[in-house]
């Protein structure tokens, strides 16, 4: 009976907070339940304030540390930048950016484009932000879908990267003569 009561409390919490049942498939969910079951008697969950400040910061640092080995290979192996547009259950218009190479894929970020005309230039600027974070010389390719605005964005990104690489070549040749 005690297990059924706990299961019902879990379900009430998930339903009351609109948390998707997919969380039951998450390895983090199982890790959390395991840790709670082994916690000291009388354990209390963190406060709202602690969760949104110090714990969130610590979680961010841990994720960055886990991603460091992947990022460290970008210079050696290069990176493919992949992007796609979609809408979530709230009908927000989103575009995401993923960096991938032989060491793995990494979600970089997602932008909300509600009320924004998704022109080639707007999408190109969004992609160029990611390319700047990765390092333009590390980018091997940019992959999007074949919508007209994405094709236009690809041409803009290509022009910008060619300008940057010509600037790097010019700069390098000038340095080698000094």
Image: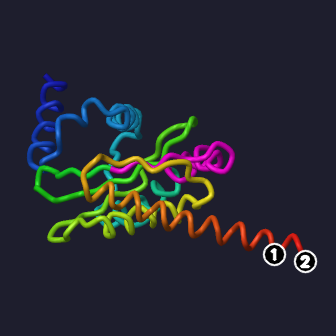
Magenta stretch, residue numbers: 63-83
In the displayed structure, does residue 141 sit left or right of residue 110?
right
Looking at the rendering, in which quadrant would you find the C terminus? bottom right
Q: State the SS at label 2.
A: loop
The quarter in which the N terminus is drawn is top left
Q: Which residue is mark 2?
A: 178
Q: In the displayed structure, does residue 105 sit left or right of residue 91?
A: right
The answer to whether 31 appears left or right of 93 in the picture is right
SS assignment at label 1: helix
SS assignment for the magenta stretch, majority: helix
Residue drawn 39% across the image and 34% down it: 31
Count of all numbered marks drawn on residues in the image: 2
Q: In the image shown, does 44 or 127 lie closer to the viewer?
A: 127
Callout 2–callout 1 Cβ contact below 8 Å: yes
Q: Position of residue 102 (x, y in %)?
A: 57, 35
> Gap in Å between the C-alphas at discs 2 and 1?
7 Å
Name the side, left or right, on which 167 lies relative to 156. Answer: right
Identify which residue, 78 or 166, lies in the foreground.
166
Q: Quadrant of residue 152?
A: bottom left
Residue displayed at 11% across by 55% down: 90
Res. 174 mark: 1
């Amino acid at each position: 009976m005690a297990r059924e009561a706990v299961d019902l409390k879990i379900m009430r919490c998930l339903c009351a907070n609109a948390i998707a049942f997919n969380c039951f498939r998450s390895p983090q969910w199982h890790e959390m339940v395991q840790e709670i079951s082994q916690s000291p008697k009388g354990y209390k969950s963190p406060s709202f304030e602690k969760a949104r400040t110090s714990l969130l910061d610590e979680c961010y640092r841990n994720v960055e540390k886990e991603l460091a080995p992947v990022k460290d290979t970008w210079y050696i192996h290069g990176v493919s930048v992949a992007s796609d547009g979609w809408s979530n259950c709230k009908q927000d218009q989103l575009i995401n950016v993923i960096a991938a190479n032989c060491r793995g894929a990494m979600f970089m970020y997602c932008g909300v484009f509600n009320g924004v005309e998704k022109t080639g230039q707007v999408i190109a600027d969004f992609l160029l932000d990611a390319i700047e974070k990765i390092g333009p010389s590390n980018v091997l390719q940019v992959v999007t879908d074949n919508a007209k605005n994405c094709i236009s964005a690809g041409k803009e990104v290509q022009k910008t990267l060619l300008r940057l690489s010509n600037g790097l070549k010019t700069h390098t040749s000038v340095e080698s003569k000094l």
